[in-house]
Amino acid sequence: MALETSAETPAPLRQISQLLDGYIGRLGLVWVEAEIAQLTRRQGMCFLKLRDLEAKISIDATCHVSVLDVSPVPVTEGSRVVAHAKPSFYAPRGSLSLDLREIRPQGEGELLAQLERRKQLLAAEGLFDPRLKKRLPVLPRGIGLITGKNSAAERDILQNARLRWPEVRFVVRHALVQGNDSARDVMRALHELSTDDTVDLIVIARGGGSVEDLLPFSDEGLIRAVFACPTPVVSAIGHEPDTPLLDLVADLRASTPTDAAKRIVPDVHEELVGVAAMRERATLAVRAMLEREVRGLAAIRSRPVLASPATLVDAQQSVIHESRDRARRSLGHRLERAGDEIGHHLARVRALSPLATLERGYSVAQLTDGTVITSISQVAVDTDITLRVTDGSIGLRTLTVSPSSKKALHG
């Protein structure tokens, strides 16, 4: 019911505040479209000022920091958002504010949120893995260039690349670089160049633009085509702040088309300077090696053994002569000792031989068959015997045989 008041019966201000609080509380949760004019974070809370997109109307709002943190893209001052909020009226100060429960970026922010979700999905599949990047050739035989017809990006790349390496060869394929058919047209040109055996590198270039203009270069189909391309791909889309998904899947990201021209071919002047420096270093290294070897040979030649090679032979010859003399002396001593031993043995043998006994006046009596007579029992009277002496033998015949007395023998 409407509050009835008059100049005579006015309503207290507190009553008006209570009524306003009740009216606003019954409004419930609402979706609000606005622009963030101010944003302050303090002790886990965010304090915002929302401004209408057309009228000069603003209202305070608060939320927990988690409400902003869950947003797929950063929410900052100037962002256009749609917020799910509950209006509230603070009676003591008579101020109206919004308690934000959810914030969704709109316009460019919504596009960025979609790109972020697509980026996360493709990254989860490994399409942006740095380990899968292909190495660019040092000096490609042919470079495929996909860009807009008569575009500044095409001129920048061709001119700067040829200034660096005049003999570089380009295979240019013009394609739409903006609009709904752009991604399909770029994929067609990419397929043509990837099947050309003379093309070792492909560059996709465009001269920058807004987020909406660069959307074709974040198309999922194009991203997958670049990932599957067997030829290394360089992305040269836009300027330094522009980051379409093509930059992430390409084997090399160039910040600008001019930067791409500097990175796909070497500078011939720098290479010539490098070759000259390497030649000079190689010459110095060879000279130093030769000088070191010459000094080494001189040091070796100065050694006594090489200055007079016969010295070593003479020294060894002296050693051999000394060894020979020692061997001769040793052998002579051994022969002398052996001769003395033989003489001693010979004298001993001679002293014990029967011949020596015969020389002392003894003789050996033998029968005619050579049997030595040692007893009278072997001989009878008229027996022929042979008597052997030192210088011969004597034939005898026994006349008598008589035994001898033991006493006479042992006398």
Image (tube, rainbow, N blue to C red):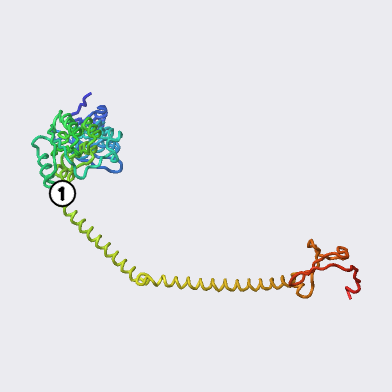
Circle 1: residue type: Asp
Say few, some or many: other residues with alpha carbon within 10 Å of mark 1 (under 14 / 14 to 19 / 20 or more): some
* Closer-to-camera residue (53/229): 229
What residue is shown at x 90% (from left), y 70% (from top)?
404
Q: Quadrant of residue 229?
A: top left
What residue is shown at x 30% (from left), y 43% (from top)?
43
Q: Quadrant of the C terminus?
A: bottom right
Look at the picture and state if 333 lies above or below 72: below
What residue is shown at x 12% (from left), y 33% (from top)?
174
Extreme-left residue of the structure? 150
Where disc 1 sits, the SS reads loop
Q: Which residue is mark 1?
A: 267
* Closer-to-camera residue (59/109): 109
Look at the picture and state if 239 lies above or below 118: below
Q: Position of residue 243 (x, y in %)?
A: 20, 39
Q: Position of residue 114 (x, y in %)?
A: 23, 32
Q: Quadrant of residue 249?
A: top left
